[in-house]
């Protein structure tokens, strides 16, 4: 493959090629000795249905981009038995890299082991929290686990290096390590040495543009280009040159928008047209993070540890304000950036790919199927509570049960309960705990006799960025105390809520009187197309379509609908399962051709009027 100069629309073509750094000040990317400008867009195949990969890549190409940047999430590839799945559905790394090559697009390879990406635990398996493994350090236990993964994905990716005729031109070392509060530079060197021994390179790193992010990392190093975020102007660019002179600069994450959390208010995408012009005028290399975000299907959405409550779980949608929206449609920004890029390149833009069809479907009212406390996977007896990871469960739910003695009104306190919980005493709900609110105690009413205490805990995303990652275990973490004394003799029922277990759950004939439930609908379709399942009349839970977990919903917004791509549907009967935490009676669902947000044209009020 070779990439021509900026004056021509540069694309990757077949052949073995050498990628290097050069130019007057060694500040240009070279392919076979020719200077190139990298114009990349972040696409993450694990967030996009495989059937739509080619469409999304072509959308990037039609915007004037010549490269695809992709994170790869370790914890999605890793299977329960310790093996790695790089073949099924949207985990087929080789198929994705082959497709990028077929479409004439270079690849910026971002394998981790940590990726951030608003992905659960930053892509690292949460099971490592079980035994206090110090992730992203030289802890031998972590290195042994990371090396297994890196070796496995290296085996898949190596044939796709540019020197082997593939599209990979740069490999990223770890990710945003300058923002990690527990820095260990030797660990960065370990990651770099691993890839170097495997024949990968050149390398780059992505960090914030500032002294506190870049100081004391492994710069300067002539083998490492500087990638940083957001890379909006000359000041940011100068930080990169300061810490690593004599190598090219890449704005690895130029943000056209930003992530969103549950419960946040109105939001608008960013306008970065000035930055795009600046990049193009100076032939500066950049990457839109993200060009197209896709969807955090299942339980893959992560969380931040900021905000008033110290915990900010991410939405299921990863739209991000990207120029290509969640369903793959071009936005106004897409056309603005496309014009700037092609005006600078000086060639006629290719046609924009046709939009993927979307449809609505009529309202359907699901039926009660089972109690939320039914269909548990296993039960454990223990003296003190155990957190999820200690019980080999990542997310889902758990039911913690014990008893409290007779006595006067008392105070129930706890070390930590993550992330959303209902507290029941003798079948009566006495509290709801939302980790975002930082509530630390519960009033227990007077009891004339011993009373059954049950705490129903739902886990949300593991923190994926910052110091909170180190401690973010799920469920009851530590002890629960009554008037300062730890409660003992717990029974814990586990419910991982996998797609298979929900689809095959046994029905219940009798309701148990607790909040929530498992509801099921059969949606009959005479055709299939993308749709957005409107959950605006429900409160909090998870939706499954034909056994696939399509993500969480929560009426705190801003997201009120869940994207369901056509490949998840079938003509005829479609089974929709809803695991709802709060409502005891089913509400209608329907399909929309466009997403529903609290701050969109289809507001909660408007949606209610349209049913």
Image (cartoon, rainbow, N blue to C red):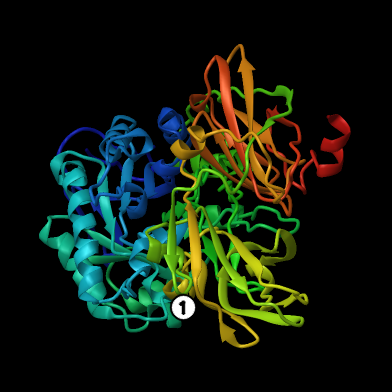
Q: In which quarter of the image is the N terminus?
A: top left
Image position of 350 (left or right of 339): left
Residue 531, relative to residue 240: is it above or below? above
Q: Which residue is drawn at 58% across and 51% down?
A: 320
Image position of 571 (left or right of 378): right
Residue 381, relative to residue 338: is it above or below? below
Visible residue check, residue 235: no
Q: In which quarter of the image is residue 171?
A: bottom left
Farthest top residue in view: 526
398 or 569: nearer the viewer: 398
| Label total for image | 1
- Across and down, in percent, residue 588 comes to 75, 32
Visible residue check, residue 343: yes
539 or 276: nearer the viewer: 539
- Across and down, in percent, residue 407 comes to 72, 81
Q: Which residue is drawn at 65% across and 73% down?
A: 309
Q: Which residue is drawn at 16% across and 63% down?
A: 194
Q: Is mark 1 on a helix, strand or loop?
A: loop
Q: Quadrant of residue 510?
A: top right
Farthest front residue in view: 449
Q: Quadrant of the C terminus?
A: top right
Residue 117, relative to residue 498: is it above or below? below
- Across and down, in percent, residue 340 comes to 55, 44
347 or 111: nearer the viewer: 111
Farthest right residue in view: 609
List the residue tagged with mark 1. 210
- Across and down, in percent, residue 55 comes to 46, 29
Q: In which quarter of the image is residue 204?
A: bottom left
Residue 339, relative to residue 169: is it above or below? above
**How busy is the neighbourhood of tag 1: few (under 14 within 10 Å), some, or many (20 plus)?**
some
């Amino acid at each position: 493959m070779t990439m021509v100069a900026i004056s021509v629309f540069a694309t990757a073509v077949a052949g073995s090629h050498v990628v290097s750094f050069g130019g007057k000040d060694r500040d240009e990317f070279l392919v076979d000795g020719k200077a190139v400008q990298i114009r990349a867009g972040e696409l993450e195949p694990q967030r996009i249905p495989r059937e739509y990969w080619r469409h999304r890549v072509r959308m990037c190409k039609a915007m004037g981009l010549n490269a695809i940047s992709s994170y790869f999430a370790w914890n999605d590839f890793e299977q329960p038995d310790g093996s790695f799945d790089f073949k099924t559905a949207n985990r087929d790394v080789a198929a994705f890299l082959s497709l990028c090559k077929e479409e004439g697009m270079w690849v910026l390879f971002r394998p981790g082991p940590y990726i951030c990406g608003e992905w659960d635990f930053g892509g690292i398996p949460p099971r490592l929290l079980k035994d206090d493994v110090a992730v992203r350090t030289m802890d031998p236990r972590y290195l042994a686990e990371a090396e297994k993964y890196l070796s496995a994905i290296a085996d898949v990716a190596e044939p796709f290096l540019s020197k082997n005729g593939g599209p990979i031109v740069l490999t990223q070392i770890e990710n945003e390590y300058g923002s990690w509060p527990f820095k260990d530079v030797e660990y960065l060197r370990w990651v770099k040495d691993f890839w170097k021994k495997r024949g990968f390179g050149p390398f780059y790193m992505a960090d914030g543009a500032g002294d506190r992010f870049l100081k004391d990392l492994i710069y300067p190093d002539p083998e490492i280009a500087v990638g940083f975020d957001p890379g909006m102007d000359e000041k940011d660019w100068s930080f990169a040159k300061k810490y690593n002179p004599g190598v090219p600069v890449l704005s690895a994450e130029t943000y056209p928008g930003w992530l969103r959390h549950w419960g946040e208010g109105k939001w608008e995408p960013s306008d970065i047209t000035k930055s795009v012009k600046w990049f193009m005028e100076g032939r500066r290399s950049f990457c839109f993070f993200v060009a197209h975000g896709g969807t955090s299907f299942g339980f893959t959405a992560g969380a931040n540890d900021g905000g008033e409550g110290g915990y900010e779980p991410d939405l299921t949608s990863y739209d991000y304000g990207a120029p290509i929206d969640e369903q793959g449609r071009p936005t106004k920004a897409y056309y603005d950036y496309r014009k700037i890029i092609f005006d600078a390149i000086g060639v006629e833009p290719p046609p924009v790919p046709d939009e993927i069809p979307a449809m609505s479907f009529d309202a359907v009212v699901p039926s009660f199927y089972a109690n939320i406390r039914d269909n548990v996977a296993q039960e454990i007896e223990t003296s003190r509570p155990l957190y999820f990871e200690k019980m080999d469960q990542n997310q889902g739910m758990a039911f913690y049960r014990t008893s409290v003695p007779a006595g006067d009104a008392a105070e129930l306190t706890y070390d930590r309960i993550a992330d959303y919980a209902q507290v029941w005493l003798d079948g009566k709900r006495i509290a709801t705990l939302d980790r975002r609110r930082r509530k630390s105690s519960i009033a227990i009413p007077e009891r004339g006799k011993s009373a059954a205490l049950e705490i129903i805990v739902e886990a949300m995303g593991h923190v994926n960025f910052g110091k909170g990652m180190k401690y973010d275990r799920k469920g009851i973490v530590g002890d629960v105390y009554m008037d300062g004394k730890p409660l003992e003799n717990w029974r814990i029922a586990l419910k991982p809520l996998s797609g298979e277990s929900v689809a095959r759950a046994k029905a219940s004939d009798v309701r148990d009187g607790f909040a929530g439930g498992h509801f099921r609908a059969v949606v009959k379709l005479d055709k299939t197309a993308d749709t957005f399942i409107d959950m605006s009349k429900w409160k909090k839970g998870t939706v499954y379509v034909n056994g696939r977990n399509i993500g969480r919903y929560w009426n705190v917004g801003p997201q009120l609908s869940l994207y369901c791509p056509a490949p998840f549907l079938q003509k005829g009967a479609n089974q929709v399962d809803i695991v709802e935490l709060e409502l005891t009676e089913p509400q209608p669902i329907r399909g929309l051709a466009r997403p529903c947000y609290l701050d969109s044209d289809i507001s909660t009020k408007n949606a209610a009027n349209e049913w």
